[in-house]
């Protein structure tokens, strides 16, 4: 047995860190400087959901499904985001919606009995962490989960889900598409709204998964109620971040923007996952350091991750990682 080592699964934080489309830019300033005061102290102003971070139920829920007021960060157990963990690599096409079928397929591929995930941390490696940058590829066109994946996590009583993408939900389930109070419906690479691009690439029926009105128009109210009814029954807009709400409403917490040397962690092998947010009173979520503790001889032989934020964050000088451009070319050439 080899020695155990710590592997960083966190994107480095700084003023230029990529951030969600309507989040403020982190402001980092000095309260004291070494030259003037003999000490260096700094202050930071930013949204606490910047970079690698944890979500608490109160982030998206007024009440959890048990009828109690949704919990804040300080009310979660100290080990809510920490414990025995496993990585599943998800085979998904660019911009694809991860469903229960993808999760079942990954478990079968790596010889994991889903029943063994009860009380464990599940880390999903979709490859999106390699594209972490201020880019459409990472934010607009991320692969991501939805209602079916959320129900799968609940069914198998997972304790925490750590995603290597922009959010626990597919971007079209968020305000980047036609959901939420802002309904940004951002412009894509073609200059048209991303909702229209998705319809063209995947079809109206596939797009309807992300749009309450379209789902009801195509499939009917009864079908919508069957799929999204658990959310709607407690006053929640079903297609707006449904994976977030299924999970957090059932007490399953989440980590977003998992990154660092995630590719060094082999799929299907158990390890210890450490992630501790601040003990923030009435916090809705918090930046955190995520680390794997694993046998050294189990690590995958891949280069150490390097970061160069500001337009080239998707790859290091050696070209490690798939470029944003290549990812988007694969997306828009999928039907050719």
Image: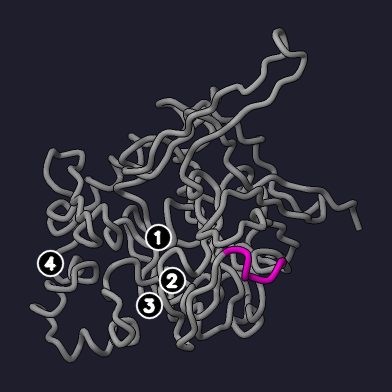
What span is in magenta? 73-78
Q: Name the residue nearer the viewer: 109 or 219.
A: 219
Q: Classify mark 3: residues with Cα within 10 Å, few (<14), some (14-19) or many (20+).
A: many
State how far apart marks 3 and 1 are (Cα). Answer: 15 Å
State how far apart marks 3 and 4 are (Cα). Answer: 19 Å
In the rendered structure, find residue 102 and report the number of the disc placed on it. Answer: 2
Q: Are marks 4 and 1 in contact (CB under 8 Å)?
A: no
In the rendered structure, find residue 204 and report the number of the disc placed on it. Answer: 4
Decide whether residue 75 is among the magenta residues.
yes
State how far apart marks 2 and 1 are (Cα). Answer: 8 Å
Q: Residue at x 42, y 40 (%)?
A: 19
Q: Are marks 4 and 2 in contact (CB under 8 Å)?
A: no
Element under label 3?
A: helix
In the displayed structure image, the side of residue 83 where residue 150 appears, left or right: left
Compared to residue 185, the image places residue 16 above or below, namely: above
State how far apart marks 4 and 2 are (Cα). Answer: 21 Å
Q: Residue at x 13, y 38 (%)?
A: 191
In the rendered structure, find residue 92 and report the number of the disc placed on it. Answer: 1
**Which residue is labeled 3 in the image?**
148
Q: Nearer the viewer, mark 3 or mark 2?
A: 3
State how far apart marks 3 and 2 are (Cα). Answer: 10 Å
In the displayed structure image, the side of residue 293 where residue 215 appears, left or right: left
In the displayed structure image, the side of residue 328 where residue 78 appears, left or right: right
Element under label 4?
A: helix
Of mark 4 and mark 2, the one earlier in the sequence is 2
């Amino acid at each position: 047995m080899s020695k155990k080592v710590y592997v960083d699964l966190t994107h480095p934080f700084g003023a230029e860190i990529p951030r969600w489309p309507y989040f403020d830019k982190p402001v980092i300033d000095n309260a004291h400087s070494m030259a003037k005061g003999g000490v260096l102290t700094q202050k930071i102003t930013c949204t606490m959901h910047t970079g690698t971070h944890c979500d608490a139920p109160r982030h998206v829920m007024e009440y959890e499904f048990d009828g109690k007021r949704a919990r804040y960060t300080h009310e979660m157990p100290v080990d809510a985001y920490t414990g025995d963990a496993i990585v599943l690599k998800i085979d998904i096409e660019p911009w694809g919606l991860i469903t229960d079928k993808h999760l079942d397929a990954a478990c079968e591929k790596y010889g994991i009995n889903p029943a063994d995930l009860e009380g464990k941390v599940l880390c999903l490696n979709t490859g999106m962490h390699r594209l972490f940058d201020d880019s459409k590829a990472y934010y607009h066109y991320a692969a991501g989960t939805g209602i079916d994946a959320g129900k799968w996590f609940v069914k198998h009583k997972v304790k925490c889900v750590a995603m290597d993408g922009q959010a626990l939900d597919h971007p079209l389930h968020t305000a980047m598409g036609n959901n939420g109070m802002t309904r940004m419906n951002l412009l894509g690479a073609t200059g048209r709204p991303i909702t229209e691009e998705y319809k063209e690439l995947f079809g109206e029926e596939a797009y309807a998964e992300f749009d309450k009105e379209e789902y009801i128009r195509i499939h009917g109210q009864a079908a919508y109620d069957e799929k999204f009814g658990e959310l709607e029954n407690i006053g929640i807009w079903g297609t707006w971040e449904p994976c977030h709400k299924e999970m957090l409403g059932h007490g399953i917490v989440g980590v977003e923007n998992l990154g660092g040397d995630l590719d060094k962690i082999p799929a299907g092998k158990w390890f210890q996952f450490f992630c501790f947010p601040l003990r923030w009173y009435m916090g809705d979520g918090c930046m955190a350091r995520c680390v794997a503790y694993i046998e050294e001889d189990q690590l995958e032989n891949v280069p150490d991750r390097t970061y160069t934020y500001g337009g080239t964050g998707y790859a290091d000088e050696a070209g490690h990682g798939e470029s944003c451009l290549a990812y988007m070319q694969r997306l828009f050439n999928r039907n050719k």
